[in-house]
Image (cartoon, grey):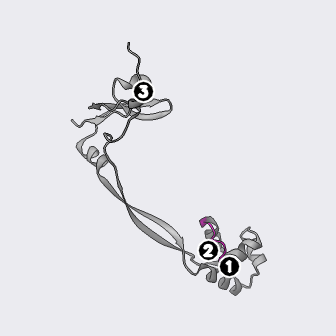
Amino acid sequence: MTKINCDLCGRIAEDLAKAVIEGVTLDVCKDCSKFGKVVSQPIRPGAKEQAKRFQSLQKEEKSETLVENFTELVKKKREAMNLTQKDFAGKINEKETMIHKIETGSFTPPLPLVKKIERLLGIKLTEEYSEAQETVRSSRREGFTLGDFIKVKGK
């Protein structure tokens, strides 16, 4: 059986239950579960789950970024559609000054606004950007637990 540490007292235990203690959900041993409300029965993580818990994980995060020349694209397409800045702003429910700032490059619009502009103009202003991130999870033995700061009165 795999043994892991209690979130509250830090002791190594084979069976940990999920308990809500002072509004926080923790994996706690049988002794510490009496300090809160048990929401699920003891957890017996297998070797696979335990290895997954402590190994480094590789995630690929995908996000959208604006293309470099988005200011030129917006202005050229708007002019090609014979729209003034005022007309264009009215169609996407924004202020004319906002359109002016976007076209001059003094303001970078948020993604929801970019999507509105893309739909109205029929052009693509974003490109997908992916970045691999590596997160490392360390064992719970490092550092303090809540149990290190709690004094329990004797019975």
Residue 36 percent across, percent down from the top left: 45, 25
**How packed is label 3: few (under 14 Cα within 10 Å), some, or many (20 or more)?**
few
Locate the C terminus and report the quarter of the image it occupies: top left
User: Looking at numbered disc 3 in the image, what kind of residue is underneath it?
Assistant: Ile
User: Can residue 105 be spotted in the picture?
Assistant: yes
Q: Residue 75's mark?
A: none
Residue located at (62% from left, 82% from top): 73
Drawn side of residue 110 relative to residue 42, left or right: right
Q: Are marks 3 and 2 in contact (CB under 8 Å)?
A: no
Q: Are marks 3 and 1 in contact (CB under 8 Å)?
A: no
In the rendered structure, which disc, 1 or 2, sits on the residue that comes first in sequence?
1
Q: Which residue is mark 3?
A: 150
Residue located at (43% from left, 23% from top): 35
Asked if 69 appears above or below 41 in the picture, the reply is below
For the residue pair 35 and 62, the one nearer the viewer reads as 35
Q: Point out the stretch of residues depicted in magenta.
A: 105-111
**How packed is label 1: few (under 14 Cα within 10 Å), some, or many (20 or more)?**
some
Q: Is residue 110 magenta?
A: yes
Q: Which residue is mark 1?
A: 103
In the rendered structure, which disc, 3 or 1, sits on the residue that comes first in sequence?
1
Marks 3 and 1, how far apart at CA: 59 Å
In the rendered structure, which disc, 3 or 2, sits on the residue that comes first in sequence?
2
Q: Which residue is mark 2?
A: 118
Marks 1 and 2, how far apart at CA: 14 Å
